[in-house]
Each structure stands twice: as structure tokens, then as C-alpha cells.
Image (cartoon, rainbow, N blue to C red):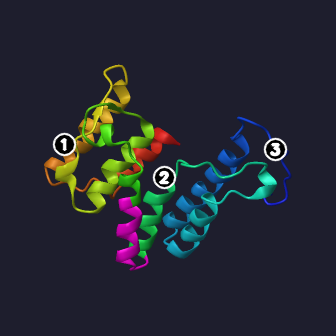
Amino acid sequence: MLDEVEVLPSENSSISHQIFAEAHVLAALDALDKADPAAALGHLDMAVTWPEHLGLGRPYNPEERIEQYLRGIALRLSGNESEAITAFEAVIAATPQGVLDGEIGAERMDLFVIAAFDALGRSNQIRIAADAEQDVLAQIIARLRSASTNGEDVQGGSTGCSSIILECVL
């Protein structure tokens, strides 16, 4: 349906692309649930495009950490470890340095860097802090940090990092 919609260009309005990207991310999650990483990759590739008919041009630094993290998962499931590592590294690279250093509080999207570090086997590099007024984020970060410190699987399973973060940001 979104392929057929024509949206007129509008300054400061990104809702058309947001709906487009979220629809493809949700379709990718559905494909991953069905153990179809190839279909998930197709949707994730579409989610990071900026089709002209949506009335927006690609910004200089678009927020694509969800897509990159899920892309890493799908690539890993497909057996393409080198590209999966590249996708997880892209999540880390897109996270502000102050967040990575624990100097400024994390926002919802910053939580994907925890999962990316864990996916790369670098849980010891997680230094993220949450603002005091963001109680939910503080709890999630503490829970994920505790799990990674204790050697628990923070990536998989129904209580894993991915599901915790996705519940928070979607």
C-alpha cells in the first residue's frame, strides 16, 4: 500500500517515512520470527531507503540503528558473519560518543548499542548511563548490564536484550 501513496513534499515532516520504515521493520521482525532471514533483509533494506514518492529526501544522518541491529541479526542467521559484524559496528558508530563513554544519559535508541556490543562479544565495553528521570531506561540498562556481567545471554530468548529494547522503542 505504501508503494502506491504519493505524499507532497513538506518541510519538517518526516511522518510518511517513519510509517514506511516502521512497517518494514515490523515485517522484518515477522520474517525473523518465521526463520526467514532473507525476507527480513529485504524489508530492512527497504526501511533505510527514502522513496521519492514519500515526499522526503534522505537526511544527512538518518536514525537507522534499529535497522542496522536487526540487519546484523538476519545476516548472522544467514551465515554471513562478516557483514553481520559490519552492521553491529554501524550501530556503535551511530551512537553519540558521550553515550558510549557513559558521560551523558542514554535515550531509547541508544539502547541498541548495548545489544550491538553484546552481539560482538564486547559486553565489557558497555558504559551506558541513563538520566535519573528516565526510570524505565535506567532499569533496562541496569538489567542488561547485569545480565552481560553475569555471563547471561542478553541477546536471545523472550527475556533477551532484543525483545526488551524493541518493547521500549517500538
- Given the current orientation, which residue lies at the most extreme left position? 150
x and y, in percent, of residue 141 in the image:
29, 38
**Disc sitting over residue 146 in the figure:** 1
Say whether residue 19 is left or right of residue 131. Answer: right
Q: Residue at x 25, y 40 (%)?
A: 101
Amino acid bearing label 1 = Ser
x and y, in percent, of residue 65 in the image:
46, 52
Residue 110 sits inside the magenta stretch: no
* Element under disc 2: helix
Mark 1 neighbour class, 10 Å CA radius: few under 14, some 14 to 19, many 20 or more:
few
Observer-nearest residue: 165 or 117? 117
Observer-nearest residue: 52 or 120? 52
Amino acid bearing label 3 = Pro
Q: Which mark's residue is nearer the viewer, 1 or 3?
A: 3
Span highlighted in magenta in the image: 78-89
Residue 86 sits inside the magenta stretch: yes
Amino acid bearing label 2 = Ile
In 3D space, how far apart are the residues under numbered discs 1 and 3 (Cα atoms)? 46 Å
In 3D space, how far apart are the residues under numbered discs 3 and 2 (Cα atoms)? 25 Å
Q: Which residue is tagged 3?
A: 9
Number of labels in the image equals 3
Q: Which residue is tagged 2?
A: 66
